[in-house]
Every structure is written in C-alpha cells, then in structure tokens.
Amino acid sequence: MADFSRLNRYRQELRKCKEKRIEMDAKIRDLERKCKEEENTAIHDIVREANMTPEALANLIHMNGAEKLAAINADADKESEDTDYDDEND
C-alpha cells in the first residue's frame, strides 16, 4: 500500500501557510489603513498650523502647478521605496 504520510504533511503545511497568508493580508490591509490615516492627520495638522482653509490649500496647490506636485510626489514615493527596502534588509 502507498505511503501518504509525506503528502499529508505537505497538505498540512500548505493549509497552515494559507492561513498565515490570510492573516498577513489582513495585517497588511490594516497597516495600509493606519498609514493613510496618519498621512491624512499629518496633512491636516500642517494645514491647520498654517491656518489655511481647504479652499486656500486647493488654490496653493493649483498655483504651484500639477507638474511640480507630480514631481514632488514621485520623489517622495522613491524615497519611501528606498526606505522600505532598507528596512527589509535590517
């Protein structure tokens, strides 16, 4: 008769890994939500500190041009990716 013990161990390990993946996906979603909340809070605090209204902020953004903001955001994203990579290697 065939020995299925190795197959059963693989299936059990696969099941455990899938459960961990589900848990990690949930943790990732939660951390992404928390990051977004903190970013929004930081933006809100900066706007409040400058004593600006939402309309004044919108005008400031439009005065500086969408191209400049896109470049700034691209630089910030690159710095964030570099930091994330550095954190993974620590």
Image: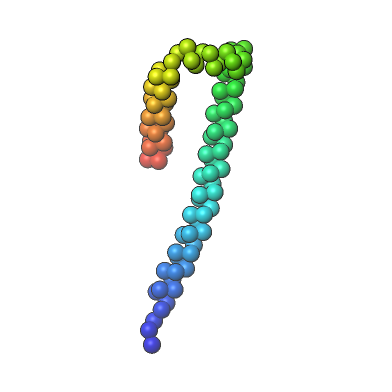
Name the residue at 42% across, 69% down.
10
How many badges with numbers are in the image?
A: 0
User: Is residue 33 positioned above or below 15 on the image?
Assistant: above
Name the residue at 60% across, 18% down.
54
User: Is residue 8 positioned above or below 58 on the image?
Assistant: below
Name the residue at 40% across, 41% down.
88
Q: Quarter of the image containing the N terminus?
A: bottom left
Q: Residue lying farthest bottom? A: 1
- Kindly tell me whether residue 90 is visible in this rendering: no
Q: Nearer the viewer, residue 61 or 11?
A: 61
Q: Quarter of the image containing the C terminus?
A: top left
Q: Position of residue 51 (x, y in %)?
A: 62, 12
Q: Nearer the viewer, residue 25 or 10?
A: 25
Q: Position of residue 66 (x, y in %)?
A: 43, 19
User: Is residue 31 positioned above or below 50 on the image?
Assistant: below
Answer with left or right where residue 62 lies relative to residue 54. Answer: left
The chosen color scheme is: rainbow
Answer with left or right where residue 48 lies relative to residue 25. Answer: right
- Kindly tell me whether residue 17 is visible in this rendering: yes
Name the residue at 45% across, 65% down.
13
Q: Position of residue 23 (x, y in %)?
A: 53, 53
